[in-house]
Amino acid sequence: MRIFLPVVTVVAVLLCATAGPTGAASLNTKGEGVAISCATPFMEDHSISADGKSSFRFHGQCSYSQGKNAWNRHYIIKGTWDGYQAKEVVTILSENKTGSVVSSCPSDPWLNKVACQKKSLSGKAFDDYQITGATSYPLTANALSDAKKAQLRAELAEKKKQSMCMTPVIVSPSPATGKTIYLPASVKLEIKHSPLNPPKEWTIYWTPPTKEGEWPKAPQKQNMTLSSLKTSGGVTTATLNASKLGTWQITVRTALPSYCNKGTEVIQSISFTVKEKTAQEKALDKSLKEKRFKSIDGKIPAPVPDPALKQQQLQQQKPM
């Protein structure tokens, strides 16, 4: 049911609101004159991550009293900042109507006092309750005081500081040392770390294999780079094409701020041995493959039924 007056400019009024009820109207229980009152929405919950992304949940209420048409409307606005734009999802609870607003901002508008531009506005909540062109965006940016914004900025700074002290974790190869890899050797590397503090230096060493009776050989620094080196968020991945037999070692260095009290850097090593399969190992692989698969006219190999399992199924099907 459509509400009278573009009142429930629920969102329009709330945006222009400062602390406390708006001065545009007051609740009039006698039904005389305009009777719309919206209090500034309050922040129910929020989260801020070290990479600067944030989310907020606001709750607000508008009241209307014009004789028998009196009502209260509660609404929820969920806002998110992804580092580029602010998105808000508005829900008018009593009518289960929603709408979304996307705004382009130079920085997080809930943490900073910045000018943003509306990119899009859509949804039933806005189709029924019109928002004037004077409305500022994001809708809830002005719901937070300067003191609250400063508090949130301090929270972000602390999250960044803690994140910088995170010790990187080698995810691949696993285990990070002692692994044997057979030619052709394309080794996938993956390290989890602070989103703000990825590894800065990679050094690659190779030690030739030794024959029986020979003295161990010294590691040789390799003038080569990792391929597909990429950092996304808190994960760095790369590939090492280890084409020579022997022992390989990758030393990874990550710098740390002095306030971490963990030294100036974290040094980690990834080491593995590249071997070539013997004739016996190759024959065993071939035998196992032939037992598990069969090839039909060069098509995709299909699994061969297990004879023991087939016999068990036949026995179960026999009448008792």
Image (cartoon, grey):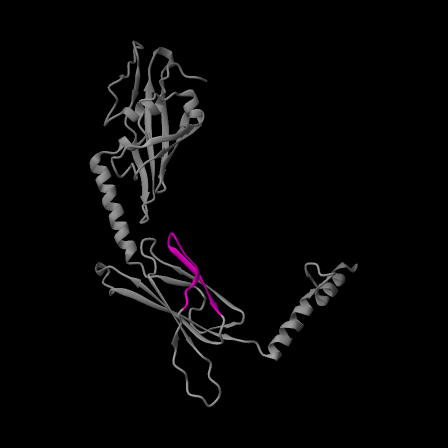
Q: Nearer the viewer, residue 133 or 220?
A: 220
Q: Quarter of the image holding residue 126?
A: top left
**Quadrant where the C terminus is found in the figure:** bottom right
Please give left or right for residue 222 compared with residue 38 in the image.
Answer: right
Residue 19 x, y percent position in the rendering: 23, 27
Residue 70 x, y percent position in the rendering: 36, 16
- Residue span colored magenta: 224-242
Q: Nearer the viewer, residue 270 or 165?
A: 270
Position of residue 133 relative to residue 236, above or below, is above
Q: Main secondary structure of the magenta part?
A: strand
What residue is drawn where x is 29% and y is 20%? 37
Residue 145 x, y percent position in the rendering: 22, 33
In the rendered image, the residue lying farthest to the top is 32
Residue 125 x, y percent position in the rendering: 42, 25
In the rendered image, the residue lying farthest to the right is 319
What residue is drawn where x is 28% and y is 24%? 16
What residue is drawn where x is 35% and y is 18%? 7
Q: Quarter of the image holding residue 292?
A: bottom right
Please give left or right for residue 244 compared with residue 41 in the image.
Answer: right
Q: Nearer the viewer, residue 227 or 151?
A: 227
Q: Nearer the viewer, residue 286 or 30?
A: 286
In the rendered image, the residue lying farthest to the bottom is 213
Residue 69 lies in the magenta-colored region: no
In the rendered image, the residue lying farthest to the front is 223
Please give left or right for residue 171 compared with residue 61 in the image.
Answer: right
Position of residue 108 relative to residue 226, above or below, is above
Numbered disc total = 0
